[in-house]
Amino acid sequence: MIDQLYRKAVLTVAGQKSIENVVRACGWGVAQRFVAGESIQTALGAVKELQKDGILANLDLLGEFIDSPEKCTAFADNVLDLMDAAHAQGITPYVSVKLSSVGQGKTVDGEDLGLTNARRIVGRAKQYGGFVCLDMEDHPRVDQTLAQLRILIAAFGREHVGSVLQSYLYRSDADRAALDDLHPNLRIVKGAYLEPESVAMPVKADVDASYRRLVYAHMKAGNYVNVATHDESIIRDVQQFVTANGISKDAFEFQMLYGIRRDLQKQLAAEGYRVRAYIPYGRDWYAYFSRRIAERPANVMFVLRGMLKG
Ligand code: FDA
């Protein structure tokens, strides 16, 4: 409950334009702990650094809730450029995309623009043998995102596109079961948005229990699972679960965010687990950065200290 109140307070304050202006002006130095620069080249540099420790990458061009259709399509073009640049440097592109950034909810030429642009992005990923994960955003987008996942898997195959379920949503067990016929590659997360109690569990212990349930159910159904968390007790339990159930290390991977628990990322990779870091980059870092601060009280002090240092 305290976690929820803390998250709500931070995300509410962060949503105020005056606070955003101050943080945007003074906070880039601090944001760099969580964001791998503003350009494709800095992002690919981060990928190569992680490769030295045997850690895979998931690239995320930052940007969400983009308003005009033209900007959405330009954003999708930038994701294509990212994949082209990665491929040209010998990196198989694995990217995450927020459908709100490429036009979800805007109809153009009779189709949802988010889906049209996602087709272009997943098509390019397939051409390079890569993968696209449709990030999950706030709860009003879940139905459409899962419906679009279904269409994209039918068109390009589950080897090239997957999505995310958030354990804080009451609906996620049912959503997972309803997707079983597709055997989709799913990332399981706890959930990072400010959601009402009518749709999301307010108590952390319930969110954690739901998290384990989703991971175990998706693994037991024979699907590839991205265990995306920094929660060591969950990670330990998943390790025990896979051992007890004879699930191979090729059937799942651990995922963590760039700049968070790098020690644990390296340790798991050294133990032979597949580990992938989610690497955000780009100029539009504010919303992503706010959610990382909202996840952990210690991060507020980290930000304030960093901003005071100038
Ligand atoms: P929890 O919040 O319980 O934290 C466990 C421990 O991890 C903490 O005690 C702390 O040590 C460490 N930790 C967690 N967050 C930290 C932070 N910000 N700074 C420093 N330490 C931190 N969400 C979403 O809604 N849609 C999505 O598509 C995604 N995608 C996604 C991809 C990947 C690869 C990850 C790892 C996470 C996401 N998320 C997400 C975010 C997710 O929903 C969640 O908010 C964060 O992962 C934090 O929750 P944990 O599972 O780490 O547990």
Image (tube, rainbow, N blue to C red):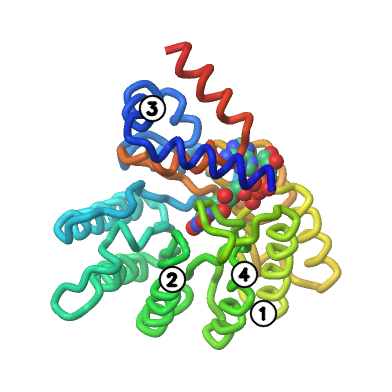
Q: Amino acid at mark 3?
A: Val
Judge whether 22 appears above or below 52 on screen. Answer: above
Circle 2: element type: strand
**Residue at the extreme right:** 244
Q: Which mark is residue 170?
A: 4
Q: Which marked residue is nearer to the observer: mark 2 or mark 4?
A: 4
Q: Is residue 127 visible?
A: yes
Q: Horizontal and vertical percent for residue 105?
A: 28, 69
Q: Which mark is residue 23?
A: 3
Query: Do tag 2 and tag 4 residues touch (Cβ < 8 Å)?
Result: no
Report the residue marked by disc 2: 161
Quadrant where the C terminus sits is: top left
Circle 4: element type: loop
Q: Amino acid at mark 4?
A: Tyr
Q: Amino acid at mark 1?
A: Gly
Side (left or right) of 9 relative to 212: left
Query: Do tag 1 and tag 2 residues touch (Cβ < 8 Å)?
Result: no
Q: Which marked residue is nearer to the observer: mark 1 or mark 4?
A: 4
Query: Which residue corresponds to the image point at 39% horizontal and 74% vertical from the top-left?
Result: 144
